[in-house]
Image: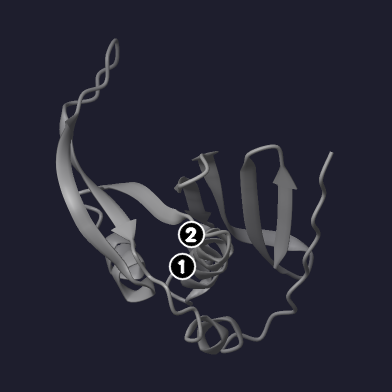
Amino acid sequence: MLMIKENKTTAYGLFLDDNLVSAAYTLIETKDVAVIGGILTSEEFRNKGFATSVVSSLTENIVKKGKVASLYVRKDNMPAIHVYEKIGFKEYSQRLWVSVNTEAKPLWITHMFSFWKNSSAIGLVLHSHKWKPRSLERDE
């Protein structure tokens, strides 16, 4: 697992054989809340728990700083919602998302928060995979 911290953005990535297969980062962090975004897993590595591990690690980092973790997800993205609920996120609200100057149709997104305080279950998720975690923290 690789963690890079620059200014107010924190990123985590999961590597297999030096290849990045899953990643997540905070879009913005304030003193009270961090908004998680950019959660991606290579298609051939999906359904192996890698996104759960990456988002769990990032959420744990946010909660340890005393912040609330927040994210947005398409209402129809049930695989992602399942991952987030498994980690401890709860639906907070729903909003209509409209893309301007694109062909995209309006869609509903779900705003989720994690009020999760106990991070003891994360270790079980992180150590259930056969990958070697790596971490790096960089403050500039």
> Which quadrant holds residue 7?
top right
Tell whether label 1 touches label 2 (CB within 8 Å): yes
Measured along the vertical axis of the image, is residue 19 above or below residue 38? below
Measured along the vertical axis of the image, is residue 4 above or below residue 2? above
CA gap between label 2 and label 1 equals 5 Å
On-image quarter of the N terminus = bottom right
* Residue denoted by label 2: 43
* Residue denoted by label 1: 46
Residue type at the position of mark 1: Arg
Q: Secondary structure at mark 1?
A: loop
Q: Is residue 31 left or right of residue 74?
A: right
Q: Nearer the viewer, residue 31 or 19?
A: 31
Specify the color scheme.
one colour
Q: Residue at image x 65%, y 59%?
A: 13
Q: Position of residue 132 (x, y in %)?
A: 75, 79
Q: Residue at image x 66%, y 86%?
A: 130
Q: How many marks?
A: 2
